[in-house]
Amino acid sequence: MAQAVTGRAGITAGIREIGVHIPERVVTNQDLEQTLDTSDQWIQDNIGVRTRRYAEPDDWTSDLGARALLDACARAGVAPDSVDLVICGTYTPDRMLPSTAVTVMEKAGISGTPGFDVNSGGCPGSVFALEIGANFITSGAYRRVAVVLGDVSTKIFDPQDRTVAVIFGDAAACYLLEPVVSGLPGLLPARLGSEPSGQSVGYVTREPRYDEEGERRQSGFGDNFTVMVGRGIRDFVLGTVPGLIEKTVTDAGLGLDDIDFFALHQANRHMVHTILDTLGQPRDKTLTNIQRIGNTSGASVPLVLRDALDGGRIGRGDQVVLAAFGAGLNYGALVTRWCGPEDFA
């Protein structure tokens, strides 16, 4: 197997813990049938979603993100103020300024720690922001980095736009990164890519929208609304992501059969299964949660990992692929040897 890239101090990064926060409010397909021209059967047949979670009206990305960060620290048994750096991956920042990472830190009771945001197109943040956080660990500059992925996607779409309303839910997750014991592998370098010609299939527009009475509709972000062309994203993903995963696994000195678990972005339940089928890998090497919580954007990959850990699907020494894709069109994948508590310095 290829060795994880180490920094000038010979340091390798690993995922010590994953914290999560999933809102309590459940919105069913039957609920959406009351306001949209859609049906429970159509949504399940085409997207694979039965229920999704909505944040409370007064909860924003920083609220969900702070709870996920605190959960990660509690699981690891460390104090929040021991975190040396906070990175927040989001496309739904609380405000244009300051960064949502700073607000997350305030709500988590952290002061004096640097923090900044990463906008890599929402969903791909689970790999892009993770790669950035890992590089800060391997540089030797920081020894505990919190990478928070959070979005309140349901606040930024037109409630009458069924294309997005049937898919998205709100949630946050947090990777807690630390150096692993010298000589042990952890996170391998990611393969990242962008296809700018596809940026029109997923974006946030600033064009105002009006209802049938001519009244101006507003999202939680004013005139900002998410726009998505599902077929365009699907065609790109199925034509690009399987090959990306194969190359990433080869970079790691492994074959696909050596991978114990695939944590894939939950854009569409059927798409996740098709990617595994295309790779010639059994579907029981992954799991899906989109049917319960919807597409949670950048949080979806770490939420899948959390489910896999809680269900005993991942253990120390397992080889795990993380892959995500979304607006940009941005896409990325990496391989990690899963670490246990005893693997951290």
Image: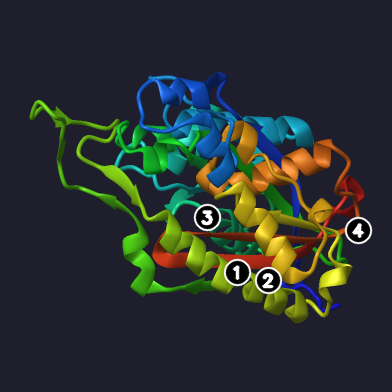
Q: Say which of 76 and 331 sits in front.
A: 331
Q: Say which of 290 and 223 sits in front.
A: 290
Name the residue rendered at 43%, 66% in the picture. Answer: 329
Check disc 1 and report its element: helix, strand or loop: helix
Residue type indicated by callout 3: Gly
**N-terminal label among 4 and 2:** 2
Query: Against 250, is 154 above or below?
Result: above
Mark 4 is surrounded, within 10 Å at the Cα level, by few (under 14), some (14 to 19) or many (20 or more) other residues, namely some
Q: Nearer the viewer, mark 1 or mark 3?
A: 1
**Residue 51 is at least partly visible in this image:** yes
**N-terminal label among 1 and 3:** 3
Q: Which residue is mark 1?
A: 241
Between the residue at mark 1 and the residue at mark 3, the CA separation in whole angstroms equals 15 Å
Q: Is residue 212 left or right of residue 260?
A: left
Between the residue at mark 4 and the residue at mark 1, the CA separation in whole angstroms equals 25 Å
Q: Is residue 160 left or right of residue 166?
A: left
Residue type indicated by callout 1: Val
Q: Say which of 28 and 67 sits in front.
A: 28
Residue 62 position, x and y percent, is 46, 33
Q: Which residue is mark 3?
A: 125
Residue 74 position, x and y percent, is 73, 30
Name the residue rendered at 33%, 38% in the picture. Answer: 157
Query: Against 330, is 129 above or below?
Result: above
Mark 1 is surrounded, within 10 Å at the Cα level, by few (under 14), some (14 to 19) or many (20 or more) other residues, namely many
